């Protein structure tokens, strides 16, 4: 169990280091903070076109709206269970998506041309070749939002419907899913079942996802200090239908988080900006600290969800 004393030390670090936005999330999840404060802080990253940029995702300092950063914002709103589509933040998101900016034949671009004009990690270098694979995750994430909330008579909805059918057909035969692809399929299949979308064998699709998850999780915990796939990439609560088959390795990760928490710091990140480090060394140092705050919140939510926090916390 993570103790109250350790929790207080982590909380102090967050208050001293986190951006206002991540601090609002911390307060929401651990101090009965309000959704309104999270939304207010999030709105400062939204552009006039309704999309999100402005370093909301700390590895990409592009101020312009991008599909991925917009999905990042959508997922935050989903996680805090804010669903008021009449709110300006959602009206902006729909405006951005209806514009079909960076929507290609294969789906939404993962990386966009203007990324190259601003400090960023190398995986955000613009590459249309990389987009063909890496776009799968962001495309499925945004498609879920469109299918749930967009006007069914819109051009965008019709295009997304066709794209989703193509992606579902590829699930059982593809072997390359990109960084976000498997996670994208998890969300997509969950929502399509909820919407009763199409005549698909969802049991078969879920079995395929179960196998992909099981095969992609790194079982050698000595490698978890590097950038590799841990169970929490796909399983974030016991309510996940993929939890039972991976229960032991999930609990191993929870214990690993507690055991690897530094005595005088919080969890670090497992990556750098590699080839872009020299060019953007100062910006990466800032990004790294932002990411540490993000990771602290994610890890503490995991420990809370799986009952690895002492009872007197939160």
Image (cartoon, helix red, strand yellow):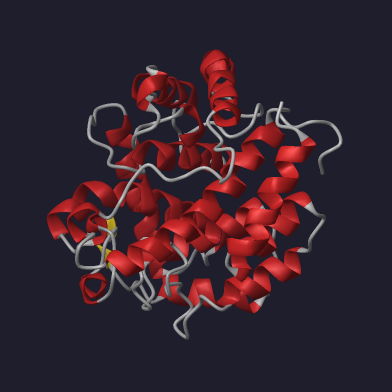
Would residue 308 appear left or right of 129 to someone viewing this image?
Answer: right
Can residue 178 be spotted in the picture?
Answer: yes
Indicate the quadrant where residue 200 lies: top left
From what the image shows, is residue 42 above or below residue 211? below
Which residue occupies the extreme front position in the image? 264
Q: Quadrant of the N terminus?
A: top right
Would residue 65 appear left or right of 166 to someone viewing this image?
Answer: right
Which residue occupies the extreme left position in the image? 129
Find residue 28 and report its horizontal and vertical position in percent: 74, 57
From what the image shows, is residue 26 above or below residue 4? below
Q: Nearer the viewer, residue 147 or 225?
A: 225
Q: Nearer the viewer, residue 12 or 95?
A: 12
From what the image shows, is residue 46 above or below residue 188? below
Q: Quadrant of the C terminus?
A: top right
Find residue 284 and report its horizontal and vertical position in percent: 34, 62
Indicate the quadrant where residue 254 lies: top right
Would residue 277 appear left or right of 45 to someone viewing this image?
Answer: left
Q: Residue at x 80, y 54 (%)?
A: 31
Q: Residue at x 84, y 31 (%)?
A: 311
Q: Residue at x 68, y 66 (%)?
A: 38
Find residue 128 and report its horizontal and vertical position in percent: 15, 60
Q: Residue at x 26, y 60 (%)?
A: 124
Can residue 148 be spotted in the picture?
Answer: no
Q: Nearer the viewer, residue 13 or 178?
A: 13
Q: Nearer the viewer, residue 188 or 290?
A: 290
Total of numbered circles in the picture?
0
Indicate the quadrant where residue 49 lies: bottom left
Find residue 245 and report its horizontal and vertical position in percent: 53, 14
């Amino acid at each position: 169990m993570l103790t109250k004393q350790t929790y207080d030390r982590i909380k102090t670090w967050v208050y001293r280091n986190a951006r206002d936005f991540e601090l609002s999330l911390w307060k929401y999840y651990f101090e009965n903070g309000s959704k309104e404060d999270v939304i207010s802080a999030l709105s400062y990253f939204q552009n006039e076109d309704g999309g999100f940029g402005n370093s909301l995702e700390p590895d990409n300092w592009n101020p312009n709206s991008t599909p991925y950063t917009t999905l990042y914002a959508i997922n935050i709103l989903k996680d805090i269970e804010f669903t008021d589509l009449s709110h300006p933040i959602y009206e902006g998101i729909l405006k951005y998506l209806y514009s079909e900016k960076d929507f290609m034949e294969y789906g939404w671009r993962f990386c966009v041309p203007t990324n190259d004009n601003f400090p960023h990690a190398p995986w955000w270098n613009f590459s249309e070749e990389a987009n063909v694979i890496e776009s799968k995750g962001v495309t499925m994430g945004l498609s879920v939002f469109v299918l749930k909330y967009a006007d069914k008579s819109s051009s965008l909805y019709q295009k997304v419907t066709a794209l989703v059918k193509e992606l579902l057909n590829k699930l059982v035969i593809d072997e390359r899913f990109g960084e976000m692809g498997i996670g994208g399929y998890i969300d997509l299949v969950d929502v399509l079942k909820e919407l009763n979308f199409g005549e698909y064998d969802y049991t078969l699709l879920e079995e395929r996802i179960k196998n992909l998850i099981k095969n992609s999780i790194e079982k050698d915990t000595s490698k978890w200090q590097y950038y590799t796939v841990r169970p929490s990439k796909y399983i974030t609560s016991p309510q996940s239908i993929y939890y039972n088959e991976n229960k032991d390795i999930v609990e191993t990760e929870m214990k690993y988080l507690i055991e690897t928490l530094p005595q005088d710091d919080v969890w670090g990140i497992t990556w750098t900006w590699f080839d872009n480090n020299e060019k953007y060394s100062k910006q990466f140092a800032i990004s790294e600290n932002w990411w540490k705050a993000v990771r602290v919140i994610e890890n503490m939510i995991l420990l809370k969800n799986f009952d690895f926090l002492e009872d007197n916390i939160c």
